[in-house]
Image (tube, rainbow, N blue to C red):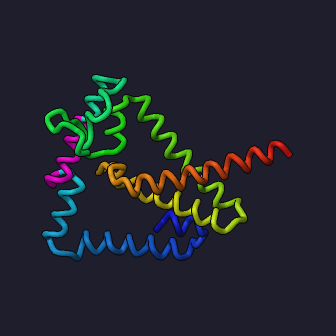
Amino acid sequence: MFFTLFLEKKYNLLRIVLLLVIMLVTYISFFSSKELQYFVLDTLSFQNTSSLGHLFEWLEGVNSMLKNPMGIGLAMSGNASGVDQSLKISGENQFLIYGVQMGFLGLLIYTAILFKGIKDCLKVFKHSSIQHVQSISYVAAATKIGLLIPLFTANAELYLFVSFFTWFLIGFIQTYYLNNSLNRNNQ
């Protein structure tokens, strides 16, 4: 929501949403039930079993990356059905899954492709005059930005429709972006 409001330059509405978030945090901190306060505090301090489980998985993944900087191979990490559960390492973070499987270089390439795709989608959104291209670039950028937080706590690329669809949109925008930049250079 913040990304969309910022992109559309609706700063007043952005301030209102930010104020509502601050009010919600204040309400939870001072006026909500003790159970809700303890649940939020336990989650943020990694005392909740789910949060603690994510933390252990992340540490296991980072440890594996430090031991094997070139990776341990595909289908050795994550929570996909092809992964042998007795060998599974770090199934709780998309970035760490790629890092464990393909090493630091693979993680760097994946992250670079992701952020380059988002950056180029935003450029096309701002500078294109074709409505459907603007819409596609907006959807691609907003979806990938929206998936950044879930990528830290889940293997989101495992959901093939979301993965294939968003990468297809980014590929379409990359083709459009490269064709237009090549056309500008040739003129």
141 inside magenta stretch = no
Which region shows up in magenta? 47-60
Eyeballing the image, is 59 above or below 119?
A: above
Taking depth in this image into account, of 66 and 100 the one nearest to the observer is: 100
57 inside magenta stretch = yes
Asked if residue 2 lies left or right of residue 80, the reply is right
At horizontal 56% and vertical 63% (from top left) the residue drawn is: 138
At horizontal 52% and vertical 46% (from top left) the residue drawn is: 115
At horizontal 55% and vertical 65% (from top left) the residue drawn is: 6
Eyeballing the image, is 101 above or below 175?
A: above
Determine the main secondary structure of the stretch shown in magenta: helix
At horizontal 51% and vertical 42% (from top left) the residue drawn is: 113
Residue 41: quarter of image: bottom left
Eyeballing the image, is 75 above or below 30?
A: above
Q: Estimate the x, y position of residue 3 in percent, counting from the top left.
A: 50, 63
Q: Estimate the x, y position of residue 5 in percent, counting from the top left.
A: 53, 69
